[in-house]
Image: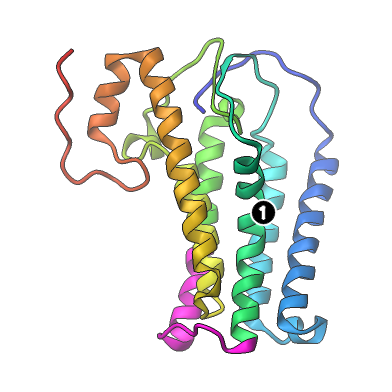
Amino acid sequence: MKTETTEGPRRPHPAVTVLLALGVTALDAALLAGALGGTPALLAHHRALALLGLWTVGGVTLALLRPVRGHDAVTVEREAPFVMLALFVIPLASPPVAALGERLALWALPGGAALRWAGVALSGAALALRIAAMAQLGPRFSPRVALQRQHALETRGLYARIRHPGYAGAWLVALGGSLAFGSALALPLVAVMGSLLWSRAGREESMLERHFGDEYRRYRARTGRFVPRLVPSRTPQV
């Protein structure tokens, strides 16, 4: 969400957040090793190692930026616990499921090595998009659908053309990580994640429209939710 706060609970030391990020990467590596058939198979898999390298750099960068900070929410929209759980588990599970599909030769996708390396590149570029979006918001970033004191609508930079570049980046990271193994086995999970993010973005937009009114409607009319809008829509007359 696009918010500004001046105070919040004391944040962990950067070393702690970096260690947590490395711990997540270690979990990613363990899951990929299990899916590919063991550590030697992982170490011999160049695309898997490239993904782990990208995720490590991205995780450490986010840990140092620490965009998720204390918030002073005045309105928080309740969200089903399974949604938050799914949005955490699916990105973690999708690449290993696709890797398992590659090892077992299930639901192979056409395109060969070109598609697989394109998936690696997509995952890296999308991670950079997500990091840039979170960095632009800085302390205004929130993992919850909420309105906060001193709430400010972000319409510059990445947000000048796309209303939810962070959500788009998160989904494309999962998609790229799945395509990197050339199996469609994980694509249903990626589709579920996209549906959940689309629905979440819609709830967030409804809240922002109630709060900002015509200002938000004008912003929404000239931007796309996850991709840039080619032709601005007409703002409803109210």
Position of 60 relative to 47 (above/below):
above
- Name the spot of residue 141 as percent of width and height, x first: 57, 30
Which residue range is magenta in the image?
Answer: 104-123
63 sits left or right of 54 in the view: right
Question: Would you place residue 199 above or below residue 90 in this image?
Answer: above
Type of secondary structure dominating the magenta stretch: helix
Scheme of image coloration:
rainbow
- Residue closer to the observer: 123 or 185: 185
Amino acid type assigned to the residue bearing label 1 in the image:
Val
Snapshot quadrant of residue 186: bottom right
Q: Residue at x 81, y 22 (%)?
A: 10
Residue beneath the point at 53% across and 51% down: 170
Q: Which residue is mark 1?
A: 89
Q: Compared to 135, does 34 lie above or below?
A: below
Q: Residue at x 75, y 86 (%)?
A: 41
For image coordinates 61% across by 35% down, the residue present is 80
The answer, for residue 235, to whether it is visible in the render is yes
- What percent of the width, then of the height, locates residue 212? 36, 14
Q: Secondary structure at mark 1?
A: helix
| Dot 1 alpha-carbon crowd within 10 angstroms: few under 14, some 14 to 19, many 20 or more | few
Q: Quadrant of the C terminus?
A: top left
| Viewer-nearest residue: 183 or 165 | 183
Q: Position of residue 20 (x, y in %)?
A: 81, 48
Is 116 a magenta residue? yes
Question: Is residue 180 shown in magenta?
Answer: no
